[in-house]
Amino acid sequence: MAKSSTSMEKLKGFLSSQISDEEKWALNSKLLRAAGLFAASIVLMRNFGDLMAI
Amino acid sequence: MGSSVSHAAAPPPPPTAVGLAVALPPKQDEKAEPKNVDWLNLPCPVPFEEIQREALMSLKPELFEGLKFDFTKGLNQRFSLSHSIFMGSMEVPSQSSDTFKVPTAHYEFGANFLDPKLMLVGRVLTDGRLNARVKCDLTDNLTLKINAQLTNEPHFSQGMFNFDYKGTDYRTQFQIGNNAFYGANYIQSISPHLSLGTEIFWLGHQRKSGIGFAARYNTDKIVVTGQVASTGIVALSYVQKVSEKVSLASDFMYNHLTQDATSSFGYDYILRQCRLRGKLDSNGVVAAFLEERLNMGVNFILSAEVDHRKKDYKFGFGLTVGE
């Protein structure tokens, strides 16, 4: 009988493979940093952009 | 003790319009009903290659390292000459993370002819390169553009022909380049604020082809664009026009082939005497670019780019004289 794994285990397995692997983590950290800066800058611009007006 | 309580008089009736005020339309509420969209008369979208132009204008100033001097002299209404000197370092793209800087110095002579229907621009450099651009309005809606870069080194010259057609609510472009490059793109207004576009290209010599899709949503205050290409590139941008003089912009680019993701956030202040642009990158690069108008036709330029991660510091200054 094939080993069946729950979706939670599959998710954990996927996440740990992405984090522990050196190459993948290099790309993932860049992606997280870039996406985080992009999203945070949009939130900042929309909420506090008027403070920078002259 | 007679307290005379005067009954509050009824509030006076609103003044009736007198004189010329009768001719004015009555004031509408601020939150009027949304205007009906005329779906058959949508505005013409921006050209496909300029879909991210607001973000590029704010986030990609021409940073340089060294000294730059530009002089433009108009000979008559249509014809002008330009002289340009550059002394500094140019970065050579390399595969490794180290940056290779090559000290360069060159003088560039240029001639411009500007007509309402025809534009000719030529530049010659002391290292033997020639740049030429032609833009010709063949009809009201059809434009021909030619770009050429010729060099002494064999196999490094490039040329490109572009045919642009502008419709009522769409634009289309067809490109033919050397090395058997063929490309086409099309952009269509879907609503007064949204336009969608697509592009396709074919590189003959390398037998490569690609397709891409783009979307642009703009209102008076914001511009949001997104681009996806089969070459593995995803590019998003967001520009907020805070006021007439101030813009804030942010962009995100992911390249699947080089496994690279970059995001930057910048500001653009356009004031009467100067233009200041600054940006911050997710790779730890901070840059600023200032153009200060010292006098009529004289601009002083300062450029700075600091890469904290690679410890690469680039500072440049220059002067631009003439229009």
Image (spheres, coloured by chain):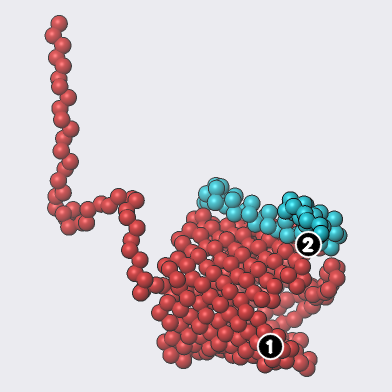
Chain colours: A cyan, B red
Q: In percent of the image, x 55 and y 87: which residue is there?
A: B174
| Image point (43%, 90%), residue name | B139
Vertical arrangement, residue A12 with respect to residue B142, above or below: above
Question: On the image, which quarter does residue B131 sit in?
Answer: bottom right
User: In this orientation, which residue lies closer to the viewer: B148 or B191?
Assistant: B191
Image quarter of residue B12: top left
Q: State whether residue B309 appears in this view.
A: no
Residue at 60% over, 86% down: B183
Report which quarter residue B128 is drawn in. bottom right
Label 2 resides on the chain identified as A
| Mark 2, secondary structure of its residue | helix
The chain holding disc 1 is: B
Residue identified by numbered label 2: A27
* Pointer 1 residue: B203
- Viewport quadrant of the N terminus of chain B: top left
| Camera-nearest residue between B102 and B321 | B102
Mark 1 vs mark 2, CA separation in Å: 29 Å
Amino acid at dot 2: Leu
Residue A7 relative to residue B172: left or right: right
Q: Position of residue B6 (x, y in %)?
A: 15, 20
Q: Position of residue B7 (x, y in %)?
A: 15, 22
